[in-house]
Amino acid sequence: MTITKSTLNAVRSAVALVKDPEYPDLNIQQLGILEDVVIDASSIRVDLVPTILGCPALDTIEQDVLAAARALGYEVTVRFCHSPAWTPDRISDDAKKILAHEYTIAITPRTGNTECPLCGHTSLEKRSDVGPTACRSVHWCPNCRNPIEVVRSRKAQDQ
Amino acid sequence: MDEFEAFLDAGGIVEPNDDIPERYRHAVFRFIELHANSEYMGGLTERDWIPKAPGMHRKLTALAKSQDEIGHAHLLYMVAADLEVKTREEMMVDLLEGRTHFHNVFHYRVHSWADQIAVAYLVDGAALASQQAVFKNCSYGPYKRILRRVIAEEGFHMRNGEEMVLLMAHGTNTQHEMMQEAINRWWLPAVQLFGPDSRPDDELLRWHIKSERNEDLRDRYVQKFVPQLLNGGFTIPDPGLRKDPDDGKWKISEIDWEPLKKTMRNGGPDSARRIADARSAWENADWVRTALDAAAKAHT
């Protein structure tokens, strides 16, 4: 079987829609987990970038990616890449809005302070480095008095 | 109060900076404290299984679930403490001294890995159903927002539980038997998680802290889980279980709620050990809290 560019595109479009197991409203493309779909020794390989090493959802994501490709009639392999490293910058703008509005989850901007997704307050108080998941830290907004989870950047994860 | 109730009936969301009637504040506090305590005790149970889970993948999952539950407790205690009924420290001490309560399902022993699967499937399934019902129409803003994330994460646990039950259902005879024994132990506690029928004057319902009556949630759970278990080749440990010929719905036997009342007063089969275990976890981690406090002070 020759794999054409349009095959790769079709697989890419299908696996892009795989939902993240912990954010059922978001897919792996929006979260920047889907890196690429490539030809590898005459078969199709899907490259994924985990948000955090040792993420417990990886197995589930892999199964869902395999199933999405299979639904199109393709057997693919999944590779989890350690490079490039995932950063919150990889999250799409629309996904950032959903995270903020639906989940009360903030993202640290490249410059400036993290804003409370509810009231826009910019002096959040950090309460713990990790929260329910290893990829988010827990803060408190002293203005609207809500706990705010913030997606951790790779730099913060390394600390 | 009438005005406040009209506000709630119209779908109003209460925020911490609002003028909150005392009785509502205390009711919502008690509800969140119970939820926080339950997440905390659940996280500790999950932790017990990290070293015993079969294989790396299951260990990772157990680790992540434990972190989820403790993390949920962390968020819930923050919101509960902000209601200024008790400090977080007071809530912890009350829990560890056995003065406050946590859900019935954490008062029993988890005998085997199959029990742990039954907890992930039956108990997490019941907890998820009840949290979804609270979330749908919850009047307290900060709690509703936490529930949104809790539900997303519990959904992932649920999927994990379903996957493991299927594995046992299609496994060897020994696995099937182990799973059946676990179901026999956990079916009733899971069904009882919803509590006895709601009283007509239940304040939690009137103030939209909860949005569905306990009996409705329980019934929906039974309709979902009975067919799933039967399809897996399991039996349900209820000799009175029957399908109503009129409405085609599954009916379970009358539940004797007396043992549950005792359990909820921390007099269940494993309550004392669980609380002692939580206390030693708290005491053993004292140096971590001290070190973190010292580090935080050094930074400021």
Image (cartoon, coloured by chain):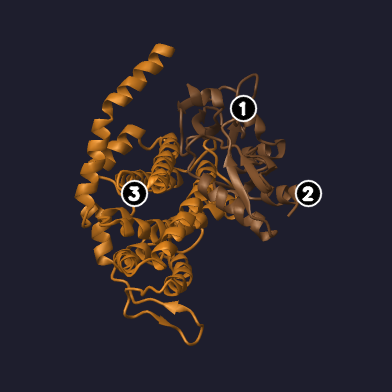
Chain colours: A brown, B orange
Kindly identify the amino acid type of the residue bearing the numbered disc 1: Glu
The earlier-in-sequence mark between 1 and 2 is 2
Distance in Å between CA atoms under marks 3 and 2: 44 Å
Q: Which subunit holds the residue at mark 2?
A: A
Name the residue tied to disc 2.
A4
Q: Residues within 10 Å of mark 2 (few under 14, many from 20)?
A: few
Disc 3 to disc 1: CB gap under 8 Å: no
Name the residue tied to disc 1.
A115
Distance in Å between CA atoms under marks 3 and 1: 40 Å
Tell me residue B261's x, y (percent): 27, 60
Tag shown at residue B53: 3
Which residue is found at the position 53% from the left and 44% from the top? A58
Kindly identify the amino acid type of the residue bearing the numbered disc 3: Ala
Tell me residue B240's x, y (percent): 34, 80
| Quarter-of-image position of residue A123 | top right
Above or below, A48 against B209 in this view is: above
Image quarter of the N terminus of chain A: bottom right
